Structures are given as structure tokens and as C-alpha cells.
Image (cartoon, rainbow, N blue to C red):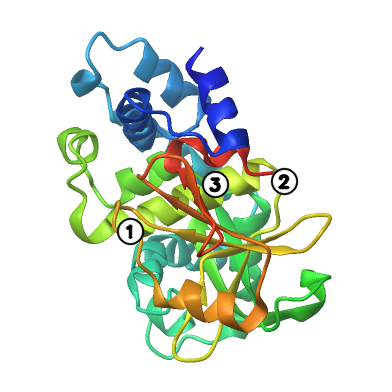
Amino acid sequence: MLIDKIKQCFDNNQAMGVLHNKAIDYYRKYLLSGGMPESVKKLISSDDYYNFDLSILDNIIDDYLNDMNNHVTSSNESLKIRKIYNSLPSQLMNASKKFQYSTIEDNAKSREYMLPLNWLEESNMIQICKCVKLPEKPLNGFIDNDTFKAYFSDVGIFNRVVNNDIKTILLDDMKIYKGIITENYVANQLKANKIDLLYWKGPRKSKIDFLISNDDEIIPIEVKSEKNTQSKSLKVYMDLYKPKYAIRISTKDFGYDPDSKVKSVPLYATFLIK
């Protein structure tokens, strides 16, 4: 019933009202487990979410990395893969969020880490979001292959890697990681809907978190982890390219502002963006 209500409000830009906080609460519980089947099974079988056994996520991470040894050709390649994976939180924490090889280790070169990076993407351990130089159709024709972001493929694993505990997640107290974990969650949801992960960088340090292309045009998507949704970047984009509308994903309820042409989508409804 809640899902039906969410779909109805998404289609009609209608507020959820009292059900909004309930749905946000479910969203935070999802951040705790992520979407890996065994982790979800453990969460929903818990008599109290505060008793959720986080070791299931530790086991998944260990299985990922141990399985890697069966597929790589050398211990040196394995070490590089682990270094890239361990660098992801730092990569996303830098101001531009652009993947930088120097973050992996001093003097690291792209040619040394390109194959391990590709391995991580092909094994679905990470998701790559490529930068678009010009937001025109077809978007894939305007990609800057040297500029990209790398996300964890599962937000529950991300929370575990940075050691966010149960209370921190459920009480929405993730502090410095909150913004990038929220963005990582949205990336996972878009990818699950088979949407290419693309973003845009523009003048005056403006950037749009994600771009999607539908039958008519390109729609910018901005992600906010709070209800405060003011953004200079989105205004720059709207002024430059004048799309029919934009999507802002945040903790705010559904709605549409005809003046700014921004459709508000709560975080829990990201799965409806196709």
C-alpha cells in the first residue's frame, strides 16, 4: 500500500503527508543493510533493527576481495585492486569528487591502475559515473573519458567500509559522509534501473550530480541529503540549457515548483526514476 501511494504521489507531484516520515524511516533502514540479498534477509528477520548483525556486510566484503584472487593473474594486480577499493571514500570526499589516481598512492599513474579499475567495474564492485562535457543528445557522444566518479556498488557496503554504526545510520547522524553516501545511494538506484551514470561540470565550479536522457530531452538530477535544497549549480545549468524541468532528490516531500521548474522527489522514491 505504501509503494502504491509513493507511485501515485510521484506521478501527480502530490505530497505524501504523514506517510512521508514513515517512508524516510524505511530509506534509512535500507542504508543500514544495502541491497545485497543476504544482508536484506538479515535485516528483515531482526526483531530490532538496532540488533542488525553488521558482520554480514563484513563477510560480503571479504568474499568480494577473496574471490578476486581467483581471477587476477598476480599478487601485484590484486594489491592494486585493493588499493583502489580502499581509496573510494577519499575519492568521493574530495571537493570535485573526481577520481584521482594520486589519491590511491603518491605518483600513481592511470596506465598502472586502469586494468585494476576496469576489473572492479566489470565485477560490479564499483560503479563508474562519467563526466559529460556538453549536455546534448546523445549524451554518450560528449563524454570526457578522463573525468569520472567511482561509487561503491552497494550503499550498505559503503557504510560498513567507513565504519558507520547502526545508531549513526538510523538516527541520521552520518556527518561528513552523509552527502556522499546519499549520492552513492542514488547512483545505485539509477544503475539498477539500467540508467547510464553520467554527470556534468560547468562554469563557476558548477556541477550536476546526474543527467538522464528521455524521449524528449536531457533532465538534470540534483541530490541533496537534507531538506535544504538551495543550489547555485542547478540554477547555472537551468539558465544555460533551459530544460523543461529538473529533478531534485532530497528528504523533502513530493512537489513541483512551476517557477523554478524543479520536480521534488524524496530519496525513497528514486527507484521510480526511469
Q: Determine whether 133 is above or below 175 in the image.
A: below
The mark found on residue 179 in the picture is 1
The mark found on residue 55 in the picture is none
The mark found on residue 188 in the picture is 3
The mark found on residue 194 in the picture is 2
Nearer the observer, 253 or 95: 253
Task: Kindly identify the residue that appears in the image at 78 percent across and 55 percent down.
Answer: 214
Q: Is residue 173 left or right of residue 154?
A: left
* Contact check, label 3 and label 2, Cβ < 8 Å: no
Q: Secondary structure at mark 1?
A: helix
Q: CA distance from mark 1 to mark 3?
A: 14 Å
Q: Is residue 204 left or right of residue 159?
A: right
Can residue 98 be seen in this snapshot? no
Nearer the observer, 244 or 197: 244
Nearer the observer, 14 or 229: 14
Q: Amino acid at mark 1?
A: Gly
In the rendering, at what x and y percent does residue 143 appear? 72, 78
Q: Amino acid at mark 2?
A: Lys
